[in-house]
Amino acid sequence: MMDIGRIATNLFGAWFQMGRQFPSATLDAIAKTVAEGEGRHRGELRVAIESRLPFSAVAAGVTARDRAAMLFSHMRVWDTEENCGVLLYVLLSEHRIEIVADRGIAKVVAPPEWEAITTHMRDQFAQGRFREAVQTGVAEAGALLARHFPSNGDSRSNELPDRPLVL
């Protein structure tokens, strides 16, 4: 059964404000936060911000969690040397935040720790602090990665791009 509320939210929600909420300077600041965090750990962190889901996806029952898992795979966040990639996914139209962690980091971080990060992000989004919300998520996820996969001092290559993917 189709969820008319989700369809309407994705068709008519505030998704069209993406450029105002996440201008280039904000994306640059988020990328800088990702890069700085990755200097303290061996993990890889990606951010994906999506304005809305297509009608066909909503009609097919695709959830924000499903979409995050698809992007985790598509963006190859799972394909890191130590299986410690993390995706922070934001679906603006539905006000959803999902974190998908690769098996290496998922084994050592309990779900409530990821949920705390999404709560902190959601609080800042509610205040209209979009850049700060994502930077908070990046910093807190980076702290978990640094605790479990601290930098070993190697000047390794950056396995994944730091700039958020905007869809």
Image: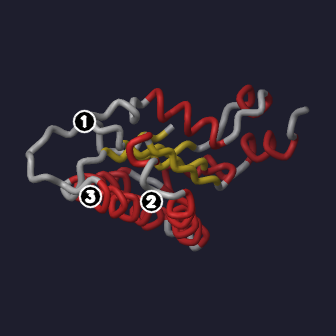
Distance between mark 2 and mark 1 Cα atoms: 21 Å
Picture layout, residue 55 above or below residue 50: above
Could you tell whether 68 is left or right of 143 in the image? right
The residue that mark 3 highlights is: 37
Earlier along the polypeptide chain: callout 2 or callout 1? 2
Picture layout, residue 90 above or below residue 29: above
The residue that mark 2 highlights is: 134
Q: Position of residue 128 (x, y in %)?
A: 55, 69
Q: Position of residue 55 (x, y in %)?
A: 74, 30
Corner quadrant of residue 53 = top right
Q: Residues within 10 Å of mark 1 (few under 14, many from 20)?
A: some
The residue most toward the right is 1
Q: Position of residue 108 (x, y in %)?
A: 42, 54
Earlier along the polypeptide chain: callout 1 or callout 3? 3
- The residue under the point 29% across, 37% down is 160
Provide the secondary structure element on which disc 1 rests. Answer: loop
Indicate the amino acid at tag 2: Val
Indicate the amino acid at tag 1: Glu
Distance between mark 1 and mark 3 Cα atoms: 14 Å
Q: Count every numbered label the image shows and give the total.
A: 3
In this orientation, which residue lies closer to the viewer: 166 or 33? 33
- The residue under the point 47% across, 43% down is 48
- The residue under the point 35% across, 43% down is 84
Picture layout, residue 98 above or below residue 156: below
- Eye-nearest disc, 2 or 3: 3
- Eye-nearest disc, 2 or 1: 1
Corner quadrant of residue 56 = top right
The residue that mark 1 highlights is: 159
Provide the secondary structure element on which disc 2 rests. Answer: helix
